Amino acid sequence: MARPRTHDDGLRVRLLDRAGELLSGEGPGALSLRRLAKDAGTSTTAVYSLFGSKPDLISALYAEGFGRFEKRLSALVRSGDHFEDLVSLGLAYRASALADPHMYSIMFTKAVPGFEPDESATNLARSTMNPLLDTIRSGIAEGVFLAEAPERIATSSWGIAHGMVSLEINGNLPPGFDVSGTYEAALRANARGWLRTPRSTPRSAP
């Protein structure tokens, strides 16, 4: 009878999630392999078996964050309305961030001094922009968006989404602030600014 696998993907994901929580909640000094193993209910041997070393763990955490992010954006079904698809990608961005807020510190900040992702992880991070770039390129080709460099529109759109999401995750918005409504309004205002032909703003319900 085969021996059961104890160092499986479920444990790997649990360790990565806990590592992200420690980094985002307490800073890099809180992330030790011994504490991580204890918090996850396993052994340091299991951590070493799955990741090899602390730097390897950080690299795996970085790749995991962007891997989840890419899957969520890539899974979005395009409607064919490039304006609405651009807004929907922004909404999916926020949904992904709120699903894994503890991943943000390693994905988008220098949470671990000295950490630099390797080439494979860097390429993965950059590839998460592909759904956004594809939507914008299609919109430009069909005359929906202005004939600007796709990267320019993508960076602007990403900046709006990332800035709003970062304020939300870091608790920098005032109490009672309409986060969802303001976020979508910002996405739509940005998208309208890149349209070749102005689109009327829907009237609010009376």
Image: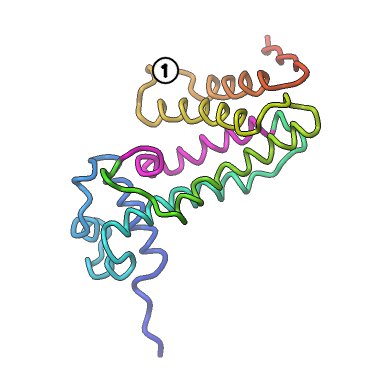
In percent of width and height, residue 73 lies at 59, 44
Q: Is residue 6 left or right of residue 76?
A: left
Residue 29: in magenta span: no
Percent position of residue 52, x then y: 29, 66
Magenta stretch?
85-110
Helix, strand or loop for disc 1: loop
On the image, numbered disc 1 is attached to which residue?
176
Figure quadrant of residue 177: top left
Instruction: Estimate the x, y position of residue 13 in percent, counting from the top left.
Output: 39, 58
77 to 89, vertically: above or below: below
Depth check, front residue: 15 or 32: 32
Q: How is the image coloured?
A: rainbow
Counting labels gives: 1
Residue 166 figure quarter: top left
124 vs 101, left or right, is right
Q: Relative to 187, does residue 9 appear above or below in the rendering? A: below
Q: Quadrant of residue 148?
A: top right
Q: Please give the name of the residue rendered at 53% of the width and 23% of the height, measured from the top-left corner.
A: 183
Q: Quadrant where the C terminus lies?
A: top right
For the N terminus, give its image quadrant.
bottom left
Q: Which residue reaches farthest right?
A: 142
Callout 1 environment at 10 Å: few (<14), some (14 to 19), or many (20+)?
Answer: few
